[in-house]
Amino acid sequence: MKTEPLPIAIVGLGFGRHIVNDLQTPELKEMFPIAALSDLDPKRTGPIAQATGAPVLDFDEILKREDLPVIGLFTGPAGRAELIRKAIRAGKDVMTTKPFERDPDAALAVLEEASRLGRIVHMNSPAPDLAPDLAQIQAWKEEFGLGSPVAAQASAWVRYNEKADGTWMDDPALCPVAPIFRIGIYLINDLVEIFGEGREAYVMASRLNTGRPTPDHAQLAIRFKNGGLATILASFCIGDGRPYRNSLILNFEHGTVYRNVGARAGDVISLIAMRGEEPLSKEASFKSISGHYQWEEFHRAVHSGSLPPADYPSKVVAGLRIVEAMAQAEHSSAPVRLAS
């Protein structure tokens, strides 16, 4: 059965250039042919336009074009909610990226408006559909009576040697606790899915190698409303050949789940627990995990008009509330209670 294409305009080519590359696979190219490009920097648009054959348009032109039903919005997070608002009011559906917005209230308002307008807004983290690895954790929790989540140790790293370039990543107000905000955000969203809303956040951060004025090595501690405790290490200073693994040790009352922990390659989760007096162990691996763009699901939702689950906006905002408290904690050097 042939896939009905949804021509897409890619807006923001700093990060969006990676999305352009992803959409060149035969399957995704059929689903989402790149039909327009937009960026404020002509140095970015020229080479990508030449490679894809897509015209370069400004954002307002894209909004007016009826032959561009979908926008891939990959600008910086600060103020992104307003761009999404313009898109949905113009009748567009939107795929965007993490972090969704710097302002939690603006994020909630635009997601609620999208629902009222019947417009689809998806992102990679948190995604509207529960990722296979998180779904497996939830299934194990129910099947084996693991009880409540009580603790987690999470980590994500890569080796960068960045220089200041005047982008939002240089600005502590726009990019608080940079490693957590840029790559640790996946883990924040995963933990919200598992633990629920946060109550308090505390931060430690360092500048070890970066040429940016923002830190490149950080740890975030979170206390959740259920009493669970979690730490997230995110670093741009570790070059071990296994970047972006989003490792997780997740302790329940009656068992522990490990995701991408240890030297073994691949997206693997395992469970150890007790079943009565007997030890229990399980293992599963996945091709698609939390943080991946769910393009097929997005394509299906746009064609069917299927809106995200009703609790999706609250999950997005729960992660952003942690970021908001984290930003305050970066400067206070003390735990910060989350806003309600």
Image (spheres, rainbow, N blue to C red):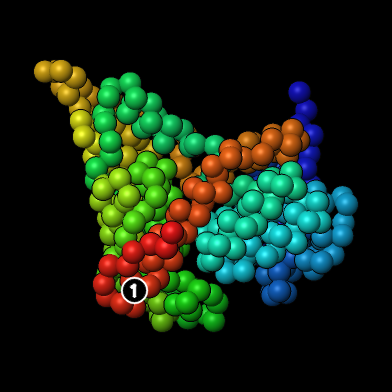
Image point (74%, 36%), residue name: 305
Image point (78%, 43%), residue name: 6
Taking the image as shown, residue 268 lies to the left or right of residue 308, namely left
Query: Does residue 174 appear anywhere in the picture?
Result: yes
Query: Does residue 239 appear anywhere in the picture?
Result: no
Q: Residues within 10 Å of mark 1 (few under 14, many from 20)?
A: many
Quick one: 155 or 21, which is closer to the camera? 155
Q: Position of residue 134 (x, y in %)?
A: 41, 36
Image point (64%, 36%), residue name: 296
Quick one: 223 or 16, which is closer to the camera? 223
Residue type of the residue flagged with mark 1: Glu
Q: Which residue is mark 1?
A: 330
Q: Quadrant of residue 209?
A: bottom left
Q: Quadrant of residue 137?
A: top left
Query: Relative to 4, does residue 248 appear above or below in the rendering?
Result: below
Query: Relative to 223, does residue 25 appear above or below in the rendering?
Result: above
Quarter of the figure with the C terminus: bottom left
Query: Relative to 100, does residue 300 appear above or below in the rendering?
Result: above
